[in-house]
Image (cartoon, grey):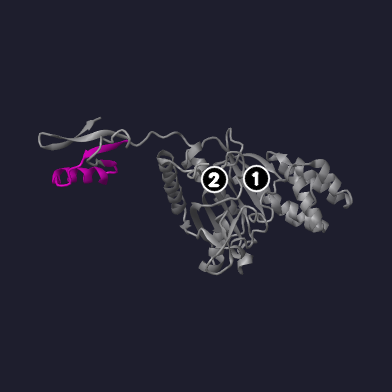
């Protein structure tokens, strides 16, 4: 085995793709900034007991762990930046009002999240803290859709769910943890027979409600059907009202493909609305998010929160193919003041200039140069290669 081979699902990013990713990162962070989101940069690793606080078991298996040689304590390499940002909001900033934060950086997963997916996503996202209403859910989903538009990802649609409905049914039925876990697994794969079997000993109304969830999948008509088939508990009514409000307020910026009331992704982490954005022809989501009001409590300060994240690698692959930015080849003449002024002027206007170092053949082709600086009648002029 060659020593320079990288681990499975880990790869280098070469110049053209790296340039595309970096440009996307800048454009999306600029978009976040003009919407009032402040950039934070959490560390790549933390003590495990802090890193996994408030996330339940959802991130535990995805997190690489190692022993800190200075303290002897267990460290974790972050698998998700969002919980770190929640810690910053709750513990470091400690603001009383609404706080909007954004971030961008590498995360590391022990296993890929799907076929041909990297174990080192470049995660970028935005979060709102301190606002419990549907207005912040609308804002964060609108921002995600605008971010995907800025990345050139076309034909995007949303799938939306609400984990609060399942939670309310579980709480009302007083299910033991083992049954709740099995029922959660059956809901995830929409195994209707398993759901009926696990709930057959419950009161009829509760069993019928659980059985209805995997079937409540489709357009806005699903919300009316859910109001008819599910118990009229206040928390369920509030969840359905939120989903109805989303369907109305997102119509100008997003196409909602379906509402899925059995979608429980991040069940131990999220507390309310959950959503995923899909691009036409793609089986994996290009953006995900949801409400997670209970995470801040683990850091000593309960704060309502909602947010989303995306992988810059995937966005770069989905966007339109960009024409390579050509550059100018300049001869090596450090003592030629006129040439140096010409090079500085081009670079000042954003044109890349490569100085052809002495001692080897011209590097214009390898550097992507399509023009060169040549001296004509005492002036340095641009000439096509």
Q: Nearer the viewer, residue 179 or 99?
A: 179
- Measured from the top left, where is residue 39 in percent x and y? 46, 57
Numbered disc 2: secondary structure: loop
Marks 1 and 2, how far apart at CA: 35 Å
- The residue that label 2 is drawn on is 7
Residue neighbourhood size for the residue with mark 1, other residues' Cα within 10 Å, grouped as few (<14), some (14–19), many (≥20):
many
- The residue that label 1 is drawn on is 160
- Measured from the top left, where is residue 50 in percent x and y? 59, 65
Identify the magenta region. Answer: 326-354
| Side of 85 relative to 215 (left or right) | left
Which one is closest to the eye, mark 1 or mark 2? 2
Q: Nearer the viewer, residue 149 or 286?
A: 286
Residue 299: quarter of image = bottom right
Look at the picture and state if 96 lies above or below 355: below
Question: Is residue 94 shown to the viewer in this render?
Answer: no
Q: Earlier in the sequence, mark 1 or mark 2?
A: 2
| Side of 157 relative to 365 (left or right) | right
Question: Is residue 343 shown to the viewer in this render?
Answer: yes
């Amino acid at each position: 085995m060659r020593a320079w081979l990288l681990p499975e699902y880990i790869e280098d990013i070469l110049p053209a793709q790296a340039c595309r990713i970096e440009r996307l990162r800048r454009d999306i962070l600029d978009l976040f900034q003009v919407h009032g989101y402040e950039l934070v940069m959490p560390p790549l690793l933390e003590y495990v007991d802090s890193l996994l606080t408030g996330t339940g078991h959802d991130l535990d298996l995805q997190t690489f762990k190692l022993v800190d040689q200075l303290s002897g304590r267990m460290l974790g390499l972050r698998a998700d930046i969002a919980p770190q940002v929640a810690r910053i909001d709750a513990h470091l900033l400690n603001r009383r009002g609404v706080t909007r934060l954004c971030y961008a950086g590498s995360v590391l997963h022990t296993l890929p999240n799907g076929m041909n997916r990297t174990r080192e996503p470049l995660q970028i996202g935005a979060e709102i803290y301190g606002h419990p209403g549907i207005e912040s859910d609308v804002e964060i989903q609108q921002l995600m859709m605008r971010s995907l538009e800025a990345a050139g990802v076309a034909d995007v649609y949303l799938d939306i769910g609400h984990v609060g409905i399942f939670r309310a049914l579980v709480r009302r039925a007083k299910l033991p943890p083992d049954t709740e876990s099995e029922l959660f697994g059956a809901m995830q794969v929409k195994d209707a027979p398993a759901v009926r079997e696990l709930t057959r000993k419950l009161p009829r109304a509760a069993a019928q409600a659980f059985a209805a969830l995997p079937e409540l999948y489709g357009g806005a008509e699903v919300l009316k059907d859910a109001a008819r088939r599910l118990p009229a508990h206040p928390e369920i009514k509030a969840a359905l009202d939120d989903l109805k409000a989303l369907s109305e307020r997102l119509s100008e910026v997003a196409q909602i493909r379906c509402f899925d009331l059995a979608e429980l992704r991040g069940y131990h982490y999220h507390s309310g609305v959950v959503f995923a954005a899909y691009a036409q022809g793609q089986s994996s989501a290009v953006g995900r998010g949801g409400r997670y009001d209970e995470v801040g409590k683990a850091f000593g300060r309960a704060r309502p929160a909602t947010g989303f994240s995306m992988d810059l690698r995937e966005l770069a692959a989905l966007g339109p193919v960009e024409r390579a930015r050509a550059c100018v080849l300049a001869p090596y003449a450090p003592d030629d003041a006129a040439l140096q002024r010409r090079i500085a002027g081009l670079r000042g206007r954003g044109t890349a200039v490569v100085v052809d170092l002495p001692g080897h053949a011209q590097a214009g082709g390898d550097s992507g140069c399509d023009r060169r600086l040549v001296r004509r009648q005492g002036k340095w002029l641009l000439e096509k290669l």
